[in-house]
Image (spheres, rainbow, N blue to C red):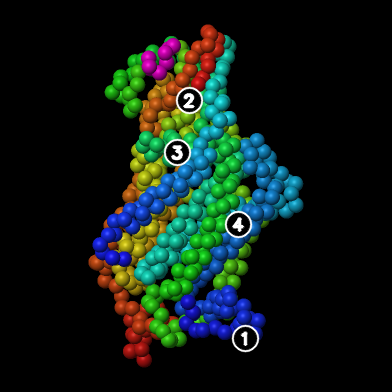
Amino acid sequence: MSDKKPERREFLFTASYAVGAVGVGAVVWPLIDQMNPDASVKALASTEVDVSTMEPGKSITVLWRGKPVFIKRRTSEEIAEARAVKMEDLKDPQKDEDRAKNPEWLVMVGVCTHLGCVPLNDKGDYNGWFCPCHGSHYDTSGRIRKGPAPTNMEIPKYEFVNSNTIKIG
Amino acid sequence: MSDHEYTPKSKFGKWFNDRLPLLSLASHLTDYPTPKNLNYWWTFGGILTFCLITQIVTGLTLAMHYIAHADMAFESVEHIMRDVNYGWLIRYIHANGASMFFLAVYIHIFRSLFYGSYKSPREIIWILGIIIYLLMMAAAFMGYVLPWGQMSFWGATVITNLFSAIPLVGEGIVNWLWGGYSVDNPTLTRFFTLHYLIPFLILGLVVLHIWALHVPGNNNPVGIDIKKPSKDTVPFHPYIVIKDGFALLMFMIVFAFFVFYTPNILGHADNYIEANPLVTPAHIVPEWYLLPFYAILRSVPDKLLGVIAMLSAILILAALPWLDTSKIRSAVFRPLYKQFYWILVADVLILGYVGAMPAEGLYLLIARVATGYYFIHFLVVLPILGFKEKTMPLPLSITEPVLGGSPMASAVKKKESLN
């Protein structure tokens, strides 16, 4: 090749590689995306739960998107305890008022934010939940207080359809 | 590859070999010159090949009866255990075979660490070995998920959640791995597919591993190069074949002991309870061969840093040929390295022990000290030792210590002077 005009050929090389890369990407993407949650999994996005028989202090666990969701009807002591906590004592500061719109009802994804185990109810140093896997303690608002978990247990999107039914999702 | 040219005797053999030199390859493999001072720690390459073949054969037969579906997997494994002819035997060989595979690979790795087999010119063999080891861990983890017991399910949940530690994209990656919002049927079917694939990837890498080995030839207990031409070597067949065969028989006795007398001792009773996404077992423990890394993960109080520490503990091994600055391969001639080597062995065993214990109190403290030391060994001790250590004189050839009855040249010389 002469030294005079390499630009034209280099442009052709670069253009060919670029078109090739786009083509490979277009073929690979469906192969990668097929692993993402499919339509049938996404279709199970909401669950309705009848909570009419729950007494204060009682907690139930329901399955939503394959994950456990804790629904707890809290006692007045538990609510008071959650609301008395100072923000500076929290690893992931969040007011109890923001976590439980109706203070009596705490609805949260029952998955430890560390590595995904299901914490145990009425256990741990803060009278809330305790994760047996790696020792994270949560308070009566489901907020992380001690242990390796980085954040509070997640509050899913939910609403009261009527006074007896909660719709999660 | 071979030092000599091979010509098949028969006319057909010659015709075939000219077109596809398989007979030349077979000749290279049988005549392959092997250092004559190799000890029994060198027999684990053959043992590991046996383990891989065993896992592939038993795995194939299990796959004929196993059903990869969240509603049926657990039952199909019980069906294999109770109804399928010799199903119990095949499954116990496969399940214990995984442990035997790791037992052999750990001996193989620590053999390399002691005799400096990872050093120039064998870095590529070593790195291929680390990749095989990583794939083995992936295959073992996914295989453990397939019976869909409680440990399967929660082990899968905890390990896949490690990826959620990645900032920003972590959750998206985890949902992609799961094919949903939790470990469920899509996760099981893809794990089965990958569990089936990985052994064949390992097989391909093993071919490369052996190919790369046959370029410089084996390292040996004194760690010096073979002189060519010399009487330092013996042909692979029959000398090494018979030695490897004997070691394999001994290994199979241990293997058979586990399969026939304590087939469940290395597993967890919780895995005979079907997976339940609402209840986590009280004490989640990975299989014994992953415990040291699990201890490292738990010893770091921060989620992301814990995951990084655990991955680094494995990946740091790939950099070992460059972290170890000593030109002397074998620990036999490195009095200080030899001591640090045994401290590292103890350190890894301690990590394995505390990995099985609850992460609290004294155990957590020990785990933290042991984790710190693990990294100090590779990042501080090894680089410095290469410059500071006063090594012992090397023998002139590997034949010299063999004839003198001691691997140390100085000792041989002393004996000679006494005479």
Instruction: Give the spatial CA distance, label 1 vs label 3.
Output: 59 Å
Q: Chain of mark 4?
A: B
Local secondary structure at mark 2: strand
Q: Which of disc 3 and disc 4 is earlier in sequence?
A: 4
The disc at residue A109 is 2
Residue at point 65%, 81% (across, down) = B12
Local secondary structure at mark 3: helix
Are callouts 4 and 2 both on one chain?
Answer: no
Q: Are marks 4 and 2 in contact (CB under 8 Å)?
A: no
Q: Are marks 3 and 2 in contact (CB under 8 Å)?
A: no
Residue range (magenta): A96-103
Residue at point 39%, 24% (across, down) = A143
Of circles 2 and 1, the one toward us is 1
The image quarter containing residue A96 is top left
Q: Position of residue B223 (x, y in %)?
A: 39, 74
- Tell which of A30 and A68 is nearer to you: A30
Relative to A41, say whether B394 is above or below: below
For the residue marked with disc 4, what is the amino acid?
A: Gln
- Tell which of B66 and B345 is nearer to you: B66
Q: Position of residue B134 (x, y in %)?
A: 46, 54
Q: Position of residue A16 (x, y in %)?
A: 40, 52
For the residue marked with disc 3, what is the amino acid?
A: Ile
Of circles 1 and 3, the one toward us is 1
The disc at residue B173 is 3
Residue beneath disc 1: B9
